[in-house]
Image (cartoon, rainbow, N blue to C red):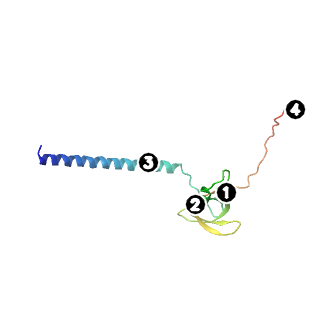
Amino acid sequence: MDLKEAGHHRKLQLQELEEIRRDAYENSWNYKTKTKASHDSHLSRKQFEVGDKVLLFDSRLKLFPGKLRSRWIGPFIVEHVYPHGAVDIKSIETAKIFKVNGHRLKPYYEGFAVQVVEEIPLSRSE
């Protein structure tokens, strides 16, 4: 085998290696886009409006959480909603307004009335 033929064979090997790398890159890209689309389809988009009551996730509590301690603080009142996902909220106690990421908020529901529909005694009194 002479040097010219060996060089030609090596160039073919390098071209095949580049094709394999390109195919692997394209397959990886396709997998990532499909995975992202699947993940994003399961996310629930939260829409807040001015005047809504919300709870704020306390990220500082992550370091030393109490076992039964809630990670949500509030309620706060929504003052302004920005189109890029940020939200201005106002504290009810201090009346301070500050801007937070909308992903750190969840709706605060209040005023649920507990009604007993029917009572069934557990002991038999015969």
Is residue 100 found left or right of 112 in the rendered image? left
Q: Residues within 10 Å of mark 3 (few under 14, many from 20)?
A: few
How far apart are labels 3 and 2 at the CA level?
A: 25 Å
SS at circle 2: helix
Query: From this viewpoint, which residue is outermost toward the front?
Result: 64
What residue do we see at 71% from left, 55% from top?
110
Is residue 9 found left or right of 52 in the rendered image? left
Answer whether labels 4 and 2 touch (C-beta < 8 Å). no
Query: From this viewpoint, which residue is outermost toward the top?
Result: 126
Q: Amino acid at mark 1?
A: Tyr
Is residue 114 found left or right of 104 in the rendered image? right
Give the mark nearest the N terminus, 2 or 1.
2
Give the mark nearest the N terminus, 4 or 2.
2
Where on the picture, by quarter, is residue 50? bottom right
What is the x, y in percent for residue 31? 41, 47
How far apart are labels 3 and 1 at the CA level?
A: 34 Å
Task: Say which residue label 3 marks.
Answer: 34
Give the mark nearest the N terminus, 3 or 2.
3
Q: Nearer the viewer, mark 3 or mark 4?
A: 4
Answer whether labels 4 and 1 touch (C-beta < 8 Å). no
How far apart are labels 4 and 1 at the CA level?
A: 43 Å
Task: Say which residue label 1 marks.
Answer: 108
Q: Amino acid at mark 4?
A: Ser
